[in-house]
Image (cartoon, coloured by chain):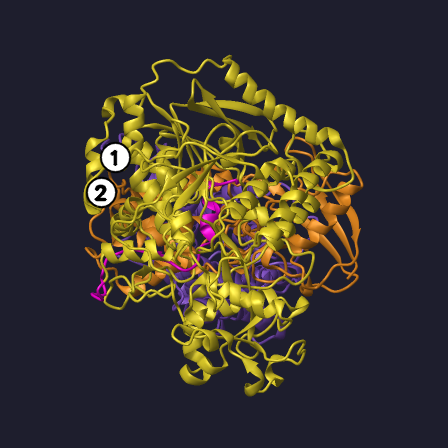
Chain colours: A yellow, B purple, C orange
Amino acid sequence: MSDYTNYVTGEPVVDTKAPEGPVADRWDTRRFEAKLVNPANRRKHTVIVVGTGLAGGSAGATLAEQGYHVVQFCFQDSPRRAHSVAAQGGINAAKNYRNDGDSVHRLFYDTVKGGDFRAREPNVHRLAEISVEIIDQCVAQGVPFAREYGGLLDNRSFGGVQVSRTFYARGQTGQQLLLGAYQALSRQIAAGNVELHPRTEMLDLIVVDGKARGIVARDLVTGKIDTYFADAVVLASGGYGNVFYLSTNAMNSNTTAIWRAHRRGAYFANPCFTQIHPTCIPRTGDHQSKLTLMSESLRNDGRIWVPKAKGDTRPANEIPEEERDYYLERVYPAFGNLVPRDIASRAAKNVCDEGRGVGPGGQGVYLDFAEAIQRMGRDKVEEKYGNLFDMYAQITAENPYETPMRIYPAVHYTMGGLWVDYDLQTTIPGLFAIGEANFSDHGANRLGASALMQGLADGYFVLPSTINDYLARNPHAEAVDAGHPAVAEAVAETEDRLNLLLAVDGDRTPDSFHREIGELMWEFCGMARTEEGLRKALDRIPQIREEFWRRIKVPGTGEQFNQSLEKANRIVDYLELAELMCLDALHRAESCGGHFREESQTPDGEAARRDEDFSYAAAWEFSSTGDAPVLHKEDLVFEYVHPTQRSYA
Amino acid sequence: MSRGPSVVSMALATRTDRRSSMTRTLWDSSVGKKTIMAVSGLIMLGYLVVHMLGNLKIFFGSDEFNHYAHWLRTLGEPFLHYEWALWIVRVVLVAAVVLHAVSAYQLSRRDIRARPNAYVHRKARASYATRTMRWGGIILALFIVWHILDLTTGTVHPGGFQAGHPYQNVLDTFSTWYGNVIYIVAVLAVGLHVQHGFWSAAQTLGVGNATRDRMLKTVGNVLAVVLTAGFVSVPVAVMTGVVN
Amino acid sequence: MKLTLRVWRQQNAETPGAMATYEVDGISPDMSFLEMLDTLNEELILGGDEPVAFDHDCREGICGACSLVINGDAHGPERTTTCQLHMRSFQDGDTIDVEPWRASAFPVVKDLVVDRSAFDRIIQSGGYISAPTGTAPDAHATPVPKPDADFAFEHAECIGCGACVAACPNGSAMLFTSAKVNHLNVLPQGAPERETRVLDMVATMDEEGFGGCTLTGECATACPKGIPLPSIAAMNKEWLRATRKVRR
């Protein structure tokens, strides 16, 4: 066993920014207590924002509107392509437009409970409060949400909650919200308040005198490595699901920005909390480069089943009713096909592990609309799910109106991320993390339609309020000296890393390593985790890392557009992050939300949370590559929503 | 049009740049130039319809045809002087032709600059009428010059040109093989040009939408066919001896 | 499947490019077109060659990054994005030509990658509604008639991929520009900037060196999101209206 697992537990980490008092008043209190920057002085402050998704785009636009000078980065050719664009379902808000009993408190309650009691109460309450303003803001920007004939906004119920609080724009809610933020950002770019660097990737964080003061970034077109300085740095670089190689993330989504910040001192919290989405299109072969998600709204009317017999290779239509196992309806009669994502995903894995999976490689289950078509008529089904059916047909060349769809779970979202306080500041002063890049609001499991809500809440409302406090207290009269040893060191490390990647000239492609680490993580740190498996993975990862630095092959040079180099450099960080994820999963010997430890289950096979031992967020401090990190625990206190064991049976 | 980033710093500030006149805006913009082409094109199209109908008078014999030609010169009298109406029409037409041609030239140059490198894999695209707008336009411009020199000034007229006797002049022209060829090719070009041009002008002027699209296409097609048939009928009638 | 690929290779914007021929074997009809290129690139890397550069990201047809002209068609023979095009659309033994978007407003960065920042600048010149964060009234303060909301949505679906420009013989960006103008101009929230928006966006479009529209309809045929051709007429109408209305 490697030394990596011999981590020590350090001082607890405490969120010093959340004020005392009733949870409903805390955001107001914090905003009042926070120091402000005089509007006339804001122009003198530069803020770097990395990423242009929902969180980064909205933060950049809003900070610029407030008068700050924003320098923003995205590795895509345009800010409009950030992966928030791909979110389908919708965005939650406690508007109670349906008068169906919704309220800020209910959204707060649902989110804490849905997160399996591993999120912070004050953060979640703030999120629920702000959700209402987000909808107003987006409508004012011209986001074309679905409307009813009376001209008012339509809502739907989503992800198994009992109220209709999800606002949506057909199956493209993420795209429309992102375009709203992108357009607001574009307006500020034209006004000269935002300096945008597209096709520029952050490769390191510059920390001067203990404070985040800039980044090292590579121009992906020319290959030039530059430094950028600021009074504060905001990371909005998204999640790290791509460590699994196959996921619903975009191909270029990566962990480098947050991992490099972690290496510079920012704690990484709950890295093992990964959400696996149950309704994705199964892979077709080894060539598969990514997985495509289909909105889980499909589970409202589709019925999930597999053949009762193992190895039944008959086409679905030839399997008679009595030889089908509608396993979710059988095991969870109350919720049936609408059980939460983690339960549906695990159940699918279980039946496939039993050898009852369908499709190529037996890695799939049926999602059948035959009954829905009979009940509602094909037209109604088409009206409700037409675009999803078309998408499925496009990818699989099968007609889902005639043969049942095949689905399989896939990595979708990472709840873990950089540890932040109530102000969204990491443990490095001046470094903030927003959106999926932080760990704060979803606990161990994220509810459907909540990611968009959190990204926009952080970017439009939370960060622009809280960053004032930091900037007011740290006016940084002195510009960073480009010759400062910390700057030179960050640049040199980056250049050395890239040069080494180019110099190895081995015999394996970047993708082959990415696939290897991804398969390992999927097997041992995926839907169900065991101590044995995690230890196996922890043994294997350093070996892969060693092999990587011996055998990687990156053609071309660093002074040009070089996609292989970009990829290889991201894999360097996956190879370290994977190790931390496994360690976090190993140390958390309980099951909660998206983290299922087979050792910790109830007699009937459900996830068993162990609040007495694990009611904390695990924030890890980096030591050095391959060496055990230090664990800092943040105890979670539940004053309003009292922990109960989830039950969906 | 004076412009620049249309947004100004911060929400409170107001725009300071001034906008140019409507004429300037029209002439400077690719959309404006298309508008100019659409309007001038429709003027010429209207003229062509009247011209074609007038041509058909040839089927009623030389007296009626020549009389009609004379009447055109007296149009608007006594409010207008002799031939004034005709000159007004000529001036408007020349203006339309010049605006149409200059806009087309400038827009074409812009279009060619915008796609400097062709695709290696070439594909026949769009309809024939759409693809031949530029060459068709050039053919028509050359034809108009010949047509005026032939039947208005008589400069290149075959056989003695007789002012005031258009019936005979038409017969002369269409008694030559090249007269027929030039004329029929030009008329076919008119048909193709109108077929795409009418619908295109409607889009440029913002009249087109999804529900009207079929109607506009039909009108364009009918105009194209009627104009072609109407104009071609004259040389065909001369060649076949129906008119002599 | 075994295929012959003829791919545009160009080192950078300054160097001239040319088509290069490659053979790929063992292609599954279930692969996406980009996965087929991944396969080629893996072989190229192992052979010590530079892989073919191409833009791609979400691979689910929504980010608008992918941008290949395949056998002369923007995004290939199906009406979809390149990432959602599958090899089952081709026959074993086919020769496939792969080229970048070609337009002077979209200079080549490398191989099949082009610079589409001109689109961003069109949006920056007016493709937004000025609604600074915090100023918004309640979302239900202004009802939007459903037909208008649907019209706005239909145009808001544009993913900014640039297939319209690539397909247009004039390299015109009218469909892209009209999609954003129509999305915002039909909404009550977009009304205060209705005239300046269309005038400024069209002017920027011209300045960026895109060609004019000759209504060939190629753009709408290539558009993977089905932005309709009448969208252009609707923008022309807005533009003409704006030239009449704006006097200050």
Q: Residue at x 54, y 74 (%)?
A: A400
| Number of other residues with Cα within 10 Å of mark 2, as a class: few under 14, some 14 to 19, many 20 or more | few
Residue A141 visible to an observer of this rendering: yes
Does any portion of residue B39 appear in the rendered image? no
Q: Which residue is mark 1?
A: B11
Quadrant occupied by the C terminus of chain C:
top left
Question: What is the CA distance from the residue labelled 1 to the residue labelled 2?
Answer: 10 Å
The subunit carrying tag 2 is C
Q: Which amino acid is tagged 2?
A: Thr
- Is mark 1 in CB contact (under 8 Å) with mark 2? yes
Image position of A649 with respect to C3: above or below? below
Q: Do marks 1 and 2 share a chain? A: no
Q: Which residues are magenta?
A: A76-101
Front residue of this view, candidates A471 and B231:
A471
Q: Give percent across and percent down for residue A580.
A: 55, 41
Report the amino acid beneath label 1: Ala
Residue drawn at 49 percent across, 59 percent down: A277
